[in-house]
Image (cartoon, helix red, strand yellow):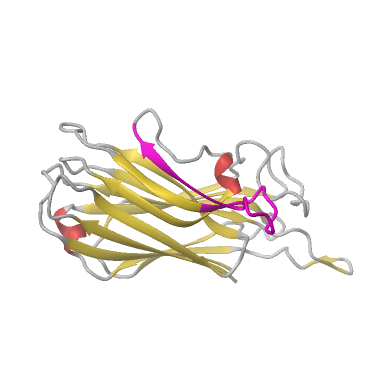
Amino acid sequence: MKLLTLSLLWIFSSSLAMAQQAGINAVSTSEDIYACNLSLNAVPTENPIGKIMGSLIWEDLTVSESSISRTRSGGYVLSDDVAAIFDSSAQWNAALTSLKLSFSTEQMGVGYNVHVCYVGPTKKEVGRNDQSEKTYDIVSSVYHSLPDYAKFAQLYYRTITRCDLRGMGSQSASRPNNQTRPSGTMEVDYSYTSNWAAFDGSYKETTVIVNANRPKNVPRFCEIVFQFKEGSTDLRPNDLKYTEVNLGVDIY
């Protein structure tokens, strides 16, 4: 079992001059699964004044764990022109440990995605058997404790699961021990997108079996994307509100 828990805290300022903020702290039981990117899926259309920006701390997975350059930090600004912190290839080199997202747009209507990367197993041969060949379930869950923001923003969410599988596509062999990220853009042999649903605060989970009835088609790499969208287009309220959100990915 590989488990990743992401905790987000939305903080809504008492003045539009201050940015509304969301923070991400990631805790994982395995180095093979990690939060790896943040991207936009929507911006306010009628009144786009304001910025979507933040700061982050991440582990550069291309650098030795013993190097002082392994841990990095920086800032970012997202827009229609630059819609993600990392591109779809570079995200596999970044394990986010802390991320702050601020949006000071006067109008609601912001949409954003939290990306999770999963590096699948290599062969685990015991005699003539490959112990890694089995069905793989990916369980994505969402929950938040205080529904105020979700209600006035009319927040919606969905999850997208995409995987590169053994035995399919041009990269069909098992993942070598020294390959820790896709070669270029990840091939997608399996894809499932849940329906948009209101984010009402109750615990919700989505379970997919990426290789049902095909245990030899073991995941090489998977990307799980949590998508959020403010359905309201009203002006942002000025009162202060807190909402803690927990996202989880469980693979077994």
What residue is rendered at 29% in x and 48% in y? 102
245 relative to 33 in the view: left or right: left
The image quadrant that residue 67 belongs to is bottom right
Question: Is residue 116 among the parts visible in the rendering?
Answer: no
Residue 188 colored magenta?
no
Foreground of the two, 6 or 103:
103
Residue 133 x %, y %: 72, 63
17 relative to 190 in the view: left or right: left
What residue is rendered at 62% in x and 50% in y? 69
- Give the mark count: 0
What residue is rendered at 16% in x and 44% in y? 17
Residue 240 x %, y %: 14, 60
What residue is rendered at 29% in x and 66% in y? 244
Foreground of the two, 234 or 55:
55
Residue 230 x %, y %: 23, 48
141 relative to 189 in the view: left or right: left
Residue 77 colored magenta?
yes
Q: Work out which residue is located at the far right of the displayed protein and give it.
A: 127
Question: Is residue 88 among the parts visible in the rendering?
Answer: yes
- Magenta residues? 58-79
32 relative to 176 in the view: left or right: left
Q: For the N terminus, which image quadrant?
A: bottom right
Q: Work out which residue is located at the far front of the displayed protein and give it.
A: 68
Residue 57 x %, y %: 48, 53
Q: For the C terminus, which image quadrant?
A: bottom right
Foreground of the two, 244 or 172:
244
